[in-house]
Image: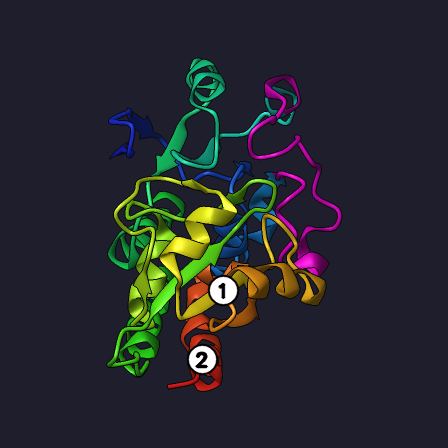
Amino acid sequence: MQTFTDALDYTFTLAQTPQRIVSLVPSQTELLCDLGLQDRIVGRTRFCIHPSDQLKNIPIVGGTKDFDPTKIKALQPDLILANKEENVKEPLLALRAQTPVWTSDVPNLAAALDMITAVGALTHTQAQSQALCQRIRSAFASLKPLPQKPTALYLIWRKPYMSVGQDTFIHAMLSQLGLHNITGHETRYPSLTPADIQAANPALILLSSEPYPFQEKHKAELQALCPHAQILLVQGDYFSWYGSRLLAAPAYFQEVLAQIKS
């Protein structure tokens, strides 16, 4: 018998190790697989796509925002994994009446490591989760951030343009690279007009592959606004997924840093 408290201050008790888990968070679903728990996952969202070979036959219960509580209940889970930012709170509260729902809140690297540790405790895979955390710490310790801290604009959406504020995980990753986020004085995901971007005049513009799938063709419109900016396409999952994908993130970040002009 173990008692747990999540990021919503919800406390619950697990009488035994969960064997039927529904995960509503893509990066936490991937984490479960990397902890060797793929056989315990009975439900996922349509955005839970990695690792594809292990998840292809697991039922989909909707999206991260529009998951179907009826489908979830039908799977008879004994644990649901959620996230404060990615999932809608009210349906999670309703699901608690039948199943323990553990909700994470991950604004930075330290919180990500805490989440991995907590999932290890929830699933009795402490040895695996602690080893993973140590490997992630070592990987980030080897990252060489830019000393000059160039100004950077990270875009996650188009029409309207949207960036990231100081309380997001992406902002924390930009800091790990030694970049000065020009919307770091904002919160959440601020919208910007073309005039805002022109006025900010960042040295670097990073176009994310998700949630909006920026492509090479989108560079021109940003280059017209900021003729002197360097514009790079980046893989958004390395900046926003806060589970086991963090193990590979520093190596990818180093590749990005190698492309940035001094």
Kindly identify the amino acid type of the residue bearing the numbered disc 2.
Ala
Judge whether residue 65 is colored magenta.
Answer: yes
Q: Badge 1, how many Cα within 10 Å: few under 14, some, many 20+?
A: many
Residue 242, placed above or below residue 175: above
Q: Badge 2, how many Cα within 10 Å: few under 14, some, many 20+?
A: some
Kindly identify the amino acid type of the residue bearing the numbered disc 1.
Cys
Q: Secondary structure under badge 2?
A: helix
Q: Which residues are magenta?
A: 43-71
Disc number at residue 226?
1
Q: Is residue 242 visible?
A: no
Distance Cα–Cα, label 1 vs label 2: 29 Å
Judge whether residue 135 is colored magenta.
Answer: no
Q: Position of residue 232 (x, y in %)?
A: 54, 71
Disc 1 or 2, which lies upstream in sequence?
1
- Say which residue label 2 marks: 251
Q: Residue at x 41, y 26 (%)?
A: 100
Towards the viewer: 226 or 242: 226
